[in-house]
Image (cartoon, rainbow, N blue to C red):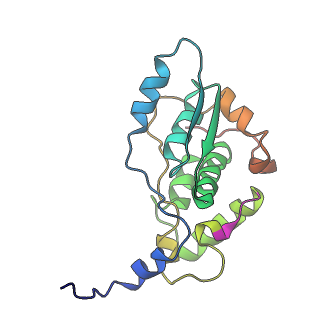
Amino acid sequence: MFSEVEYPPWVVAGEKLPLAFAQVREDALLDLAVVETFERPPRVAMVASGGCTAAALAGCGMVESLHLVDPNPAQLTLSRLKLGLLVAAEPRLRFALLGHAPMPVAQRKERLLERLGRLGLDAGQLGLAGDPGAALGELVPVEILEATPHSLLGRPLLKQATSQPYLGSEASGPSGR
């Protein structure tokens, strides 16, 4: 017989968030290797997932277009946020906003709400509306692929992405390393 396990409060709070997962364990470098085999830049349709692979493909400069689908609207919101951050935020800020670098929880929430608002995205999709729990700052999106050999400067796909309605006016141009 199974005994009931008492989970820490942050686990219980995270279970109630609409986002299924924010970090992907797939290796985007495999997708990049496949894209490199095409003679012409391909048009890619893929599951949005956590947005990491989409960000890698959008930033590589080898894809003509990228179409994301996902049955969970929260995953699409997260992917749009990550693509917007690729265009409009320096790598250090992206790392901090996505949980890979230190940033006070309240400041992370405030900055994410601001970015989501600029992009016209629903903060509730990421559990940032209301007060879903004290550990919220640790449950926001946490990963974006930075380890690509390609610069984000002047990449056509990112320029095309900035014209999409979900990126809004925040997308003034890519900020690379």
Q: Position of residue 119 (x, y in %)?
A: 74, 55
Q: Is residue 104 above or below residue 84?
A: below
Q: How many marks?
A: 0
Q: Position of residue 125 (x, y in %)?
A: 63, 66
Residue at position x 59%, y 72% in the image:
127
Furthest residue in direction top, as rendered: 39
Residue at position x 66%, y 76% in the image:
129
Furthest residue in direction front, as rendered: 1
Res 154 seen here: no
Q: Nearer the viewer, residue 71 or 98?
A: 71
Furthest residue in direction left, as rendered: 1
Q: Is residue 65 above or below residue 147?
A: above
Res 103 seen here: yes
Q: Nearer the viewer, residue 169 or 103?
A: 169
Q: Is residue 123 magenta?
A: yes
Q: Is residue 58 above or below residue 109?
A: above
Most frequent secondary structure within the magenta stretch: loop
Q: Nearer the viewer, residue 163 or 109?
A: 163
Residue at position x 62%, y 53% in the image:
76
Q: Is residue 39 above or below residue 111?
A: above
Q: Which residues are magenta?
A: 120-124
Q: Nearer the viewer, residue 9 or 107?
A: 9
- Quarter the C terminus occupies: top right
Q: Position of residue 141 (x, y in %)?
A: 52, 61
Q: Position of residue 9 (x, y in %)?
A: 41, 85
Q: Can you tell which quarter of the image residue 164 is in?
A: top right
- Quarter the N terminus occupies: bottom left
Q: Is residue 165 magenta?
A: no
